[in-house]
Image (spheres, rainbow, N blue to C red):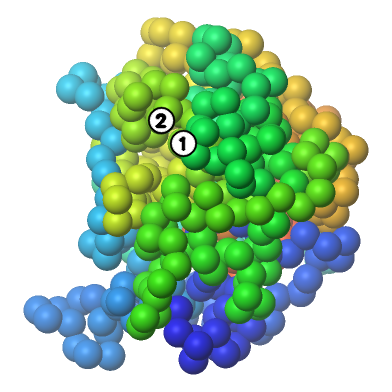
Amino acid sequence: MTKRNLSLSPLLVAASLCWSAPAITNAQTPAPPTLPTAEQTDPVKLGWMMGSPPPPDKVIRWADGSFYTFPKFRWTFSHGRELGPTSNVSRGLGAPSLLPRAERQDLDAVTFVPLGKTEPMTWAQSLSANYTDGIVVLHKGKIVYERYFGALRPNGQHAGQSVTKSFFGTIGAMLVAEGQLDPNAKVEQYIPELKDSGFGSATVRQVLDMTTSIKYSENYADPKAEIWDHVRAGNVLPRPPGYQGPKSFYDFLKTVGPEGEHGQAFAYKTVNSDVLGWLIRRVTNKSVGENLSERIWSKLGMEQDAYIAIDTEGTEFAGGGLYTGLRDLARFGEMMRNDGQFNGQQVVPKAVVDDVRQGGDKQHFAKAGYATLPGGSYRNMWWKLNNADGAYSARGIHGQALYIDPKAEMVIARYASFPMAANAFNDPTSLPAYQALADKLMGK
């Protein structure tokens, strides 16, 4: 991003800088500014990238950064492969697995009260409020609700943002269960190249649970924050003229310094996921995309290949680069709900799923101050909610979510293009909506 782009309004700064981490973690849930509605910013109605060629004022480009400004990213999130290099995640050659349908017509009218509010909202209203691009709800393995909006279609793929982390956190935990990764070993044991970085003395477990202590800020409003170096190095955002910084994810990781003692507090920093990606690649001698294809994608009977954004050296963005079909995301969630079983096989060891469900250290998590997730925790790059249903979730900025409620036997896969990056802005109309739907499905 250029210096001129750094001076954009707070809305565009928060919405357009990074694909990976929440910007707001303080004790008070922020109130979003007044914004145009989901209907007013529908990318199809606005005509983005339509025509042969599109009119100049309807063109979205990666090179000038316009691809990641609101409302243009309402188109971008469903068209990532058209804007930058990616690697493929093969579904294999088998037939897709069946997701039976038992669609219900009574769910749109389910009501709940958003966090911090007194007036109720319906489930249908929440989808618009959260700029939902697509949503699938499974109950006992059957599709009970499915909707698409804006640029996303059933046969399309959408940016998962930091939902990506939970896929690779799961694979990392599988490697621990298999004995290929020692959770107590230091990162430098596997990646000597990081010996002198802030990660060298951290353990594999500390990387998986993001309790590393490193000099790295994801404060989007600070032009000197390390997040800028990270996304420029990985080619997530365009590099300014004359750029002389790191030119790959791996090169950037070598520059991250230590700051304090590891293992003392949870701190959500995307670079941990990129270190995990390197660990996965080092011990398996396969890319993270190949691991995802062989261990998960080809075993779940997915409908579509997935794809992952890559840097200029071909390294996949393990922190936030995955694009998937919505029903395929739901299949992954259903497998996790069913103790790692799906499509007639044990895809993920039950012990790994149990470890995710148990969650991480609540005291470590509390230090991060997530107002919308009181009593929560973080384990293997999954978010554990502190609720009576034992829910846990994969979460990504701008409203991406895979929400699993074991008690309600419910899985919700949602893709969205919420204007503000941090989930703190959409949680108030998302988390209580999920709970209300779970209660409805349980007959409460």
Residue depicted at 55% across the width and 41% down the height: 194
Front-lying residue, 155 or 103: 155
Considering the image in quadrants, where does the C terminus appear?
top right
Residue 384 in percent (x, y) is at 73, 35
The amino acid pointed to by label 2 is Arg
Q: In this image, 410 relative to 414: left or right?
A: right
Residue 136 in percent (x, y) is at 47, 42
Indicate whether 46 appears above or below 204: below
Residue depicted at 85% across the width and 54% down the height: 369
Residue 168 in percent (x, y) is at 50, 33
Determine the image quadrant of residue 406: top right
Indicate whether 363 appears above or below 100: below
Please, which residue is most extreme toward the front here?
196
Count of numbered circles in the view: 2
* Mark 2 secondary-structure assignment: helix
Q: What's the mark number on residue 281?
A: 2
Considering the image in quadrants, where does the N terminus appear?
bottom left
Residue depicted at 35% across the width and 45% down the height: 315
Crowd tier of the residue under label 2, counting other residues whose Cα lies within 10 Å: few below 14, some 14–19, many 20 or above: some
Determine the image quadrant of residue 245: bottom left
Q: In this image, 164 relative to 114: left or right?
A: left
Indicate whether 183 appears above or below 315: above
The amino acid pointed to by label 1 is Trp
Q: Are marks 1 and 2 in contact (CB under 8 Å)?
A: yes
Residue depicted at 77% across the width and 30% down the height: 360
Residue ID for mark 1: 278
